[in-house]
Image (cartoon, rainbow, N blue to C red):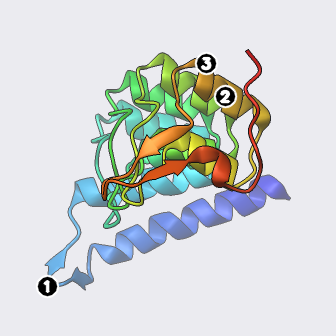
Amino acid sequence: MQNQKKIYRLLLAVFMIFIAGFVSVEGAALGRDQKELYLLFEAIEMNYAPVFTTLLGQQIDVNGQLFTGTTPLHYAARFGRVAMCQGLINAGADVNAQNLCGETPLHEAASSGSFSCCKLLLQHHALVDLPNNEGKTPLMLAMQRGTSQNICDLLTKRGAVLLVRKKCGTTEHAADFSFVYKLTK
């Protein structure tokens, strides 16, 4: 039953992308690359590896963005798709790409509670203390959303600090968020 739902959603996505080729978006039809990118996002969300692998094999732009600046790696990290994150990184995805909110894939993984994705991104040199547009680091988002203590430990062991200077010059403590993080060193 679950696989039938996946296949139905995928077919619906393919149909919508096909139709989008005939419908103009702000006066211009979506190009082939944009259609493939939308299909890649759908395959990531549905965790449908065959389509994902096929698209990567077609040399799709793994750093392509949605209108929000979100890349496929942001999306895979948000959904905790470790194997897909690895595939995107192997294909040249930028682990430090920022969306319009200034968030990187590490922000997405930390705030959604994906320890494995956080670990993978850090192994590929994701910047641990890069703040988003609101001045929040991945550690701050993990703490604010109450995600795994293991993620907080991992981020601090990789150099995340509990004190961050915001763009406006004020200082914000990560410990001011929803729970108090105790360093276990």
Q: Is residue 143 left or right of residue 141?
A: right
| Local SS, label 2 | helix
Q: Residues within 10 Å of mark 3 (few under 14, many from 20)?
A: few
Label 3–label 2 contact, CB within 8 A: no
Residue at the spot 47% in from the left edge and 54% down from the top edge: 41
Q: Which mark is residue 116?
A: 2
Tell me what residue is drawn at x 59 percent, y 54 percent.
45
33 up-or-down from 11: above or below: above
- Mark 1 — residue? 27
Instruction: Tell which residue pokes out farthest to the left in this image.
Output: 27
Q: Which amino acid type corresponds to the residue marked 1 in the rendered image?
A: Gly
> How far, Cα to Cα, is label 1 from label 2?
42 Å
Residue nearest the viewer, comparing 171 with 61: 171
Residue at 38% from the left image edge and 52% from the top image edge: 166
Q: Disc 1 or 2, which lies upstream in sequence?
A: 1
Q: Please determine whether, in this image, residue 39 is positioned above or below residue 23.
A: above
Whole-Å distance between the Cαs marked 3 and 2? Answer: 15 Å
Residue type for callout 3: Lys
Q: Is residue 126 visible?
A: yes
**Residue carrying label 3:** 157
11 w.r.t. 126: above or below: below
Rendered image quadrant of residue 116: top right
| Residue 36 on image: x %, y % | 35, 53
